[in-house]
Image: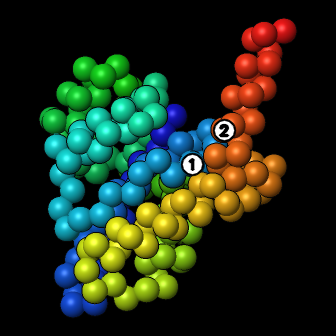
């Protein structure tokens, strides 16, 4: 299961932007942070096509009932790709706890720490922060491992079990 959600913020000039965040629930790995002023259903399809090339696709995508997640382009793409869409109940963000927790951390550590002049500045900060979050930072919920370490350890133990 991958969880996904949007966040909003503003550049120093006041221009609003959004981030589209995708997290793998298994190991809390941040798979993607898309930053732009407009992120529609068609844009989500492009993001997930890139994720498919990089990671494959999950069986399930979990989200709220935002219009981008209900849009024709995205729902048709999910159907054709064999990915089930699971929507949380309206007003129940705790049903999407992994992405909500991630959003809080991303806001506190990136968006609230900088006054960005350009979208490219947000993208660059998000990129470097994501590398640290995925590859270096230990997570209590992952036995003190980073998301990448946890995924690697799990893949290794699964391979050993299959060869035994």
- 120 or 65, which lies in front? 120
Residue 79 percent across, percent down from the top left: 27, 22
Residue 85 percent across, percent down from the top left: 37, 32
Residue 50: numbered disc? none
In the rendered structure, the answer to whether residue 33 lies left or right of residue 94 reads left
Task: Say which element carries label 1.
Answer: loop
Q: Is residue 7 above or below residue 99?
A: below
Earlier in the chain: of badge 2 and badge 1, it is: 1
Residue name at image x 28 percent, y 86 percent = 117
In the rendered structure, the answer to whether residue 6 lies left or right of residue 75 reads right
Task: Say which element carries label 2.
Answer: helix
Is residue 96 visible in the rendered structure shown here? no
Residue name at image x 24 percent, y 39 percent = 45
Residue occupied by mark 2: 151
Residue name at image x 40 percent, y 45 percent = 63
Q: Is residue 145 above or below residue 150?
A: below
Q: Are marks 2 and 1 in contact (CB under 8 Å)?
A: yes
In the rendered structure, the answer to whether residue 4 lies left or right of residue 105 reads left
Is residue 3 visible in the rendered structure shown here? yes
Residue 62 percent across, percent down from the top left: 44, 40
Residue 153 percent across, percent down from the top left: 75, 36
What is the spatial separation of the Cα atoms under label 2 and label 1, in whole angstroms? 9 Å
**Structural crowding at the residue carrying mark 1, measured as other residues with C-alpha within 10 Å and reported as few (<14), some (14–19) or many (≥20):** many
Task: Name the image quarter holding the C terminus.
Answer: top right
**Structural crowding at the residue carrying mark 2, measured as other residues with C-alpha within 10 Å and reported as few (<14), some (14–19) or many (≥20):** some
Q: Quadrant of residue 11?
A: bottom left
Residue occupied by mark 1: 29
The number of numbered discs placed on residues in the rendered structure image is 2
């Amino acid at each position: 299961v991958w969880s996904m959600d949007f966040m909003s913020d503003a550049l120093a000039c006041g221009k609003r932007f959004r981030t589209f965040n995708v997290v793998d629930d298994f190991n809390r790995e941040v798979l993607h942070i898309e930053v732009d002023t407009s992120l529609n259903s068609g844009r989500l399809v492009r993001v997930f096509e890139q994720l498919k090339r990089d990671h494959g696709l999950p069986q399930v995508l979990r989200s709220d009932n935002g219009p981008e997640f209900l849009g024709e382009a995205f729902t048709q793409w999910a159907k054709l790709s064999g990915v089930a869409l699971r929507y949380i109940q309206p007003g129940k963000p705790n049903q999407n706890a992994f992405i909500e927790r991630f959003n809080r951390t991303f806001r506190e550590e990136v968006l609230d720490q900088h006054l960005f002049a350009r979208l490219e500045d947000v993208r660059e900060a998000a990129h470097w922060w994501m590398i640290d979050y995925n590859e270096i930072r230990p997570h209590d919920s992952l036995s003190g491992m980073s998301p990448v370490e946890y995924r690697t350890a799990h893949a290794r133990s699964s391979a050993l079990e299959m060869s035994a």
